Amino acid sequence: MVRTTPCRPAGSAALRSYIEPSRYKKANTGAFIDRYVFPDGELIGSGRIITEIQDAGLEVHHEENLRAHYAKTLAGWNRNLVEHWDECVAEVGEGTARVWGLYMAGSRMGFTLNEIQLHQVLATKTTPDGSSGMPLRPTWLS
């Protein structure tokens, strides 16, 4: 996962990851997604993501579950695909357009029913003097 420190001192990194909401259930993406959408994809828990970020020497400042938002995003993307079907087919071919339409519809249900989640983690490479480069109050919450 996080193998090396990906940013300069006081720099920031954002990571988004699809996760399995239960750490007790075996997580896999399924044969369809493995073959057509995300080969070698892996669903892991948010705790593991944060642990690996910290093990890489970064300081975690914010973690957020975007599951409900992403269900709405996928609904919009799927609607856009339907409205622009001919253009999409012309660009990527009918097979690929169908795969992505099916993937987005199925994923929307997974997010809606809390079978999968999307977590975003914001971290920094804190300097030796303790400076992270992060404001005390995130601007997106102001």
Image (cartoon, rainbow, N blue to C red):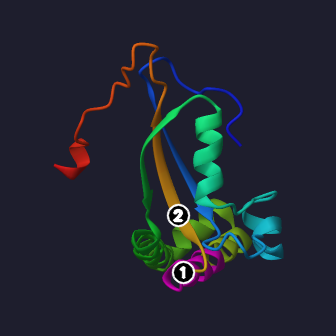
* Residue shown at the point (53%, 86%) measured from the top left: 113
Q: Does the magenta segment cover residue 106?
A: yes
Q: Which residue is most to the top?
A: 129
Q: Which mark is residue 60?
A: none
How far apart in space, not on screen, are marks 1 and 2 (Cα)? 10 Å
**Numbered range of the magenta stretch:** 102-113
Label 2's element? strand
Relative to residue 68, is residue 92 drawn left or right?
right
Q: Badge 2: few (under 14), some or many (20 or more) residues near its Cα, within 10 Å? A: many
**Residue in the foreground of this view, choosing between 100 and 23:** 23
Q: Position of residue 79 (x, y in %)?
A: 44, 79
* Residue shown at the point (53%, 77%) measured from the top left: 111
* Residue shown at the point (58%, 37%) measured from the top left: 54
Residue type at numbered disc 1: Asn
Q: What residue is pinned by disc 2?
A: 118
**Residue in the foreground of this view, choosing between 39 and 102:** 39
Q: Position of residue 44 (x, y in %)?
A: 69, 60
Q: Which mark is residue 114?
A: 1
